[in-house]
Amino acid sequence: MVKSFYSKEVIKHFNSPHNYGKIKNYDGLGKVGNMICGDEMWLYIKIAKNKKGEKIIKDVKFETFGCVAAIATSSVVTDLVKGKTIEESLKVTKEDIVKVLGELPPIKLHCSVLAIDALSEAIYDYFKKNKIEITEKMEKIHQTILNRKHDHEDH
Amino acid sequence: MKRIYLDYAATTPVDPRVVKAMAPYFNKKFGNPASLHGFGFEAVEALENSREFIAKAMNADAKEIIFTSSATESNNTALKGVAFANKEKGKHILISPIEHDCILNSAAWLKKQGFEIEKLSVDEYGLVDLEEIKKKIRKDTILVSVMHSNNEIGTIEPIEEIGKICREKGVYFHTDAAQSFGKVPIDVKKLNVDLLTASSQKMYGPKGIACLYIRKGVRIEPLLHGGGQEFGMRSSTSNVVSAVGFAKAVEICLSEMNKESKRLIKLRDKIIKTVLKKIPDSHLNGHPEKRLPNNVNVRFSFIEGESILFQLDSLGIAVSTASACSSPKLEPSHVLMATGLKHEEAHGSLRISMGRWTTDKEIDYLLKVLPEIINKLRRISPHKIHG
């Protein structure tokens, strides 16, 4: 097998991405990146309660415009949070995504950041819509993501 | 899995006939042309015959051809060599905005040395504007450099006309014909060029050799100093074996050019026609007619080029893209941007470049799988075709 630019796991997720598409009656939607930069990720979440009464991400779907790494990281982030509680989901990091993928070329690491951003924006959107208290930390992350987006749009 | 190579603009395999011609020069006729004995003489003969053949192929004199290691080196020599030899006359250099990086970065380096670099504009097809060139040439302009054809979008520039303008104004004119030589007729006299770059590895010859045509009388300084090989213009032990290969590659390209170019144009136009017809929101980059016989460059809205490339790669089809995601700088192609595309339009571009071993069957297979790949990626994309 010829050595590839991407790991086997990246190509696997890219060729058959999990959980892509829309959720029509979503509870939260995170939109990050933009077409100008070449990566744009939309993440939809549907919230439900588990037996313990905790809120969980019952369903999650993504739509991504971007490269192989952007599509693969989108696929992995949905796998990582599906069925998890919101609290657990907020603890998922870009390192968790890279771990699943084996490795990402250094130049593509920003794609894993984008996936985490999309997730946290989707949860932020859900909180906002349902008037759930947004912690200072979440607000700060939200502002950072917005700034990053506007920086790029200025280009 | 059968692999299909559609990236001949990146590099070509060496033709077996070229390999055969080169074989004796690795270890039988391996001499150094600078040596006085029989081994040396054998090498001189091979080197000079190769030079003469390549010179004739572009209607030049053998003394006007120097061998270099790459088109990059030829282009560096042309720009820097002319700049330093003519700085008393002026420091103004005009280049097109769609040149290869080796021209752009040589020019950028010259700028740091105090030269003034001005970039021309191109239209939506990547064509330069003759009137603009006329206007921008000044008394202190020492060189104009416009590529013969573009490596990404395949557009062929009006070199003969630019050459005429430069001749009239008394300004040296260089053209990078790395993608053209061997594919379309090149006649340095007819083109009115003073310097011309040609490359072996784009025309089924070995890598590591290229040449630079320098019209007799052109004032130019060498980059490499040493034993005085290549008429003092490029010191280094002569790469005889590669020169022999390069000349053989030229011979084959020339003898097959008519037939091969007709065959490739047919395939090229078939790809373009089918893609534009079968795939909604697809567009052609570059000029529909003034383009290399083997080049197709198309873009697809709402998706990204690297993703298309890897989908094709998993089916064994090799193409290329100049999307931002695939570049080390994460910036979209300067060529596509110069033609006026927006970032988001440039991202979804794909270059399909064909060659000597491309078959109808391979192209049919590509055209069969491509629409489904585009559809699949569009299903994943948040941006959809409306209406």
Image: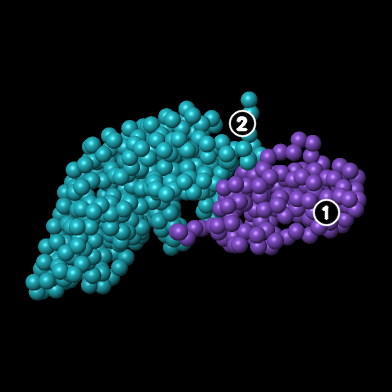
Quick one: B314 or B228, which is closer to the camera?
B314
Q: At x 85% / y 45%, what residue is drawn?
A: A48
Task: Tell me the subunit letter for badge 2.
Answer: B
State the hue of chain A.
purple
Q: Which residue is mark 2?
A: B385
| Amino acid type, callout 2 | Ile
Residue at the far left in the pictured view? B38
Relative to B211, is B113 on the left or the right? right
Q: CA distance from mark 1 to mark 2?
A: 35 Å
Residue visible at 35% across and 52% down in the picture = B11
Q: Residue at x 56, y 36 (%)?
A: B375
The chain containing the residue under callout 1 comes to: A
Residue furthest top in the image: B387
* Circle 1 residue: A85
Mark 1 residue element: loop
Q: Residue B310, image x and y in percent?
A: 51, 49
Counting from the top left corner in percent of width and height, residue A129 is at: 86, 42
Q: Which chain is cyan?
A: B
In the displayed structure image, the side of residue B318 where residue B207 appears, left or right: left
